[in-house]
Amino acid sequence: MQSDSLDGTARPQDGEGLGVLPEKEPPAPHAPREAILEVRDLVRHFPLTQGVVVKRQVGAVKAVDGVSFDLRRGETLGLVGESGCGKSTVAKLVTSLETPTAGSILYKGEDVTRLSGRALKAVRRNIQMVFQDPYTSLNPRMTVGDIVGEPFDIHPEAAPRGERRRRVQELLDVVGLNPEYVNRYPHQFSGGQRQRIGIARGLALRPEVIVADEPVSALDVSVQAQVVNLMERLQDEFGLSYVFIAHDLSVVRHISDRVGVMYLGKIVEIGTEREIYEHPTHPYTQALLSAVPVPDPSAGERRTRIVLEGDVPSPANPPSGCRFRTRCWRAADRCAQEEPVLQVPAVLRHAEGPAHHPSACHYAEEKERIVPG
Ligand SMILES: Nc1ncnc2c1ncn2[C@@H]1O[C@H](COP(=O)(O)OP(=O)(O)OP(=O)(O)O)[C@@H](O)[C@H]1O
């Protein structure tokens, strides 16, 4: 269902009318990819206040507390963790919807956190967000055409007024929706279709980076795969880089090149898809993986299941040392005193192979039979 102008065969040059999406070459398969985003020591603390008339700060919710990662051009970085671990706050920081308390976000080498005015607006255009819940993130009183074309109100330079309707229809086509539906309202679409509308809106300004905050969590499992497949196709076609957020490791596996696992405001382990899913060394990742449902029940019986005790502690008062220690079966005295750094653990430093990747644990090690072979 693609128009000629968008399938790369007969697209006019940018500024000549059509050509909704970027004229970017996807990276060559084996070319070394440079980082398009470099996130360093990112911190976002939300003040906790007391008092009605005179407010005084009595503490802070440490939603994001020292997060670093690179996003390479054309790749998908999955970010996974339980509810409240700070995933959405990272998404909002990276898309400049929130201001960090500390840290930097380099976009093509420029620190976005220090930009303002026109320079910030230009960067925002290139880093777009797709939101979680297609039921609440779309204004029910706006037509699909107005929703998808809304970014053009903020960035009128991206599409001349007379071109907008046609561009919106092309965007609908590119995400697999009938361009004739441009005057319909969100309630006339299914959940999966609404998420396609959200993706079309995210693509409108031809971004280079899309931060997708749980884009499929609210959808039925059968529809999830369709939306993930659509996002993969769009990534290939337009050379997009994704930060793909989910609370479930199984959701991001298919789409991610690399995965970062978050716990209480920090990334505790990061690596390639194979390193994280087949050779996890952090106890938290191992526990999350052991809870992923497997299609073959006999394989499920053969693997080790790790049940985590207790709840996630409050981010306003995280445990000393390693934040995971209060729920960790491997915790020792050292874990309460010394915060582990996210790096290749000393015991694995001289090892070769997929266990050799950053893991913030003093006692990191591979554990057999987490995932059935
Ligand atoms: N504006 C805010 N003011 C105060 N606290 C906040 C604010 N936004 C988030 N928090 C707190 O920061 C922590 C991290 O929230 P965040 O939404 O980033 O987590 P999450 O991993 O995305 O969770 P979920 O999957 O439930 O959305 C939570 O404890 C949350 O209550």
Image (cartoon, rainbow, N blue to C red):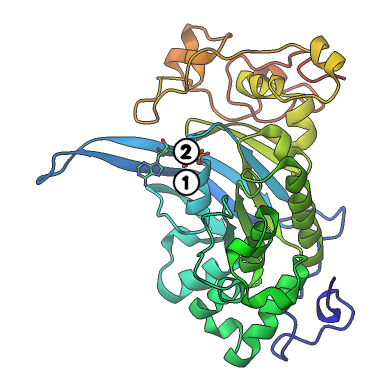
Of the image marks 1 and 2, the number of the one nearer the N terminus:
2
Relative horizontal placement of residue 293, taking residue 164 as reference (left or right): right
Q: Position of residue 11 (x, y in %)?
A: 82, 83
Q: Position of residue 93 (x, y in %)?
A: 48, 52
Q: Residue furthest right?
A: 9
- Pointer 2 residue: 66
Q: Position of residue 289 (x, y in %)?
A: 70, 24
Of 95 and 359, the residue lying toward us? 95
Q: Residue furthest left?
A: 53
Residue neighbourhood size for the residue with mark 2, other residues' Cα within 10 Å, grouped as few (<14), some (14–19), many (≥20): some
Of 312 and 336, the residue lying toward us? 312
Residue neighbourhood size for the residue with mark 1, other residues' Cα within 10 Å, grouped as few (<14), some (14–19), many (≥20): many
Q: Amino acid at mark 2?
A: Gly
Answer above or below: position of 237 versus 332: below
Of 254 and 146, the residue lying toward us? 146
Of 314 and 350, the residue lying toward us? 314
Q: CA distance from mark 1 to mark 2?
A: 12 Å
Image mark for residue 89:
1
Secondary element at tag 2? strand
Does mark 1's beta carbon lie closer than 8 Å to ligand 1?
A: yes
Does mark 2's beta carbon lie closer than 8 Å to ligand 1?
A: no
The quarter of the image holding the N terminus is bottom right
